[in-house]
Image (cartoon, rainbow, N blue to C red):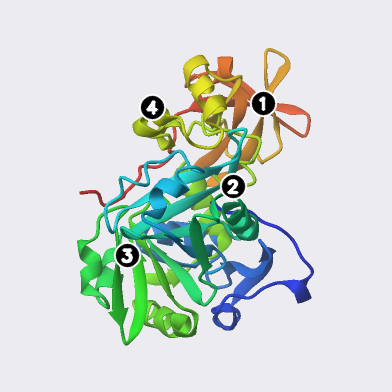
Amino acid sequence: MENAALKPAELLHKTPLHALHVSLGGKMVPFAGYDMPVQYGDMGVLKEHLHTRSHAGLFDVSHMGQAVLTAKDGDPARILEKLVPGDIAGLSAGQMRYTVLLNDKGGIVDDLMVTRWDERTLLLVVNAACKDKDFAYIRAKIGAETHLEYLGDRALLALQGPKAERALSALIPDAARLFFMTSFKTVYKGQPLYISRSGYTGEDGYEISLPAAFAESFTRELLANDDVKLIGLGARDSLRLEAGLCLYGHDLDEDTTPVEANLKWTIAKRRREEANFAGAEVILKQLADGTARLRVALKPEGKAPVREGAEIHAGGKKIGMVTSGGFGPTADAPVAMGYVDAAYAKNGTAVDAMVRGTPRPCTVAAAPFVKHNYKKD
């Protein structure tokens, strides 16, 4: 759910944890207009990745866009459904849903998380590089019926891994009662926290929204637990790729529909029947008739990774493009995803990724590359 955008260093934004990252050896790089840690000197990407899979990784995701959506009259969920294909109105208090923001052609403006706080309030979390565009789009399309409040004074942390529950519940015992895609509000040391059981790694874990001024103090409390280590963007990317999760601006964009992206599950049955969301005509036709291309997972042969931008060939012709690729430390193999002509999208299909002009054998595979470990009810 993220995308990078480069700016000169002096123009980069800083999260509330920036000074802490620097003091703890974070290697800072431009990302989505922010100065962000790609890795930490004492571990590096490989060890950070494996630590998250075996213990608990703590990610600073304060660059993401958090906003509260309310309706000027009634429930904002039905109004937001004009722009997303998910069943938002059906969420109970504390439930959350992954969905996609659509344009009138069915293209994906962004992917986002929507949480219902109560019958009159939704929390939206969108990608950092898209937040200004997203919020302007929402206001332009449904602003006459809703009020959108950007929560610029809050930080966001992601605690991911099999030891995440034990680490967070040692501070906030009620965190242990949550299941995947549920959330609650609480007060800790006088500070309002919004805690959800969710994340972007395929592991069990949490995302914690908290006041920016309290972020460093709370982070240090979590880091006092030996199981918890700060993790940078490098491992975050390899973790999400192993988990088969899309990265906006790479695997998703405004010219790609959720059907093409193999995200048909985001289009709820009720919404298909109502056909009243942006781009519904295009998307419902694709559901009925199929599409010319589809997103697939790829397993390259050997150990060298296949990178984004590599052409995918079959039978001597170009049939697609790699959109994400790298080495999966847990899978102990290169992993990738991309788009291919629909005729080549079946699992087990042999294709070639062109690496510096040389065909690299790959197999269309089932995703995720590692088992999801979410705590479900």
The nearer-to-camera label among 4 and 2 is: 4
Q: Secondary structure at mark 3?
A: helix
- Distance in Å between CA atoms under marks 4 and 1: 32 Å
Give the amino acid type for the residue marked by disc 4 in the picture. Answer: Glu
Whether label 4 touches label 3, CB < 8 Å: no
- The residue identified by callout 1 is 320
Whichever of labels 3 and 1 marks the residue nearer the N terminus, that label is 3
Whether label 3 touches label 1, CB < 8 Å: no
Q: Position of residue 264 (x, y in %)?
A: 45, 31
In the displayed structure, 232 sits above or below 130; it is: below
The nearer-to-camera label among 4 and 3 is: 4
Residue 120 visible to an observer of this rendering: yes
Q: Secondary structure at mark 4?
A: helix
- The residue identified by callout 3 is 164
Q: Position of residue 75 (x, y in %)?
A: 36, 54
Direction from residue 30 to residue 120 in the image, left or right: left
Q: Residue at x 44, y 53 (%)?
A: 113
Between 176 and 275, the one nearer to me in the picture = 275
Give the amino acid type for the residue marked by disc 2 in the picture. Answer: Tyr
Give the amino acid type for the residue marked by disc 1 in the picture. Answer: Gly
Instruction: Using the image, tell me which numbered label, if any, was put on residue 273.
Output: 4
- Distance in Å between CA atoms under marks 2 and 1: 18 Å
Direction from residue 304 to residue 263 in the image, left or right: left
- Distance in Å between CA atoms under marks 4 and 2: 27 Å
Residue 304 visible to an observer of this rendering: no
Give the amino acid type for the residue marked by disc 3 in the picture. Answer: Ala
Between 301 and 120, the one nearer to me in the picture = 120
Q: Residue at x 45, y 44 (%)?
A: 81
- The residue identified by callout 2 is 248
In the displayed structure, 318 sits above or below 153; it is: above
Residue density around tag 4, few if under 14, some if 14–19, many if 20 or more, within 10 Å: few
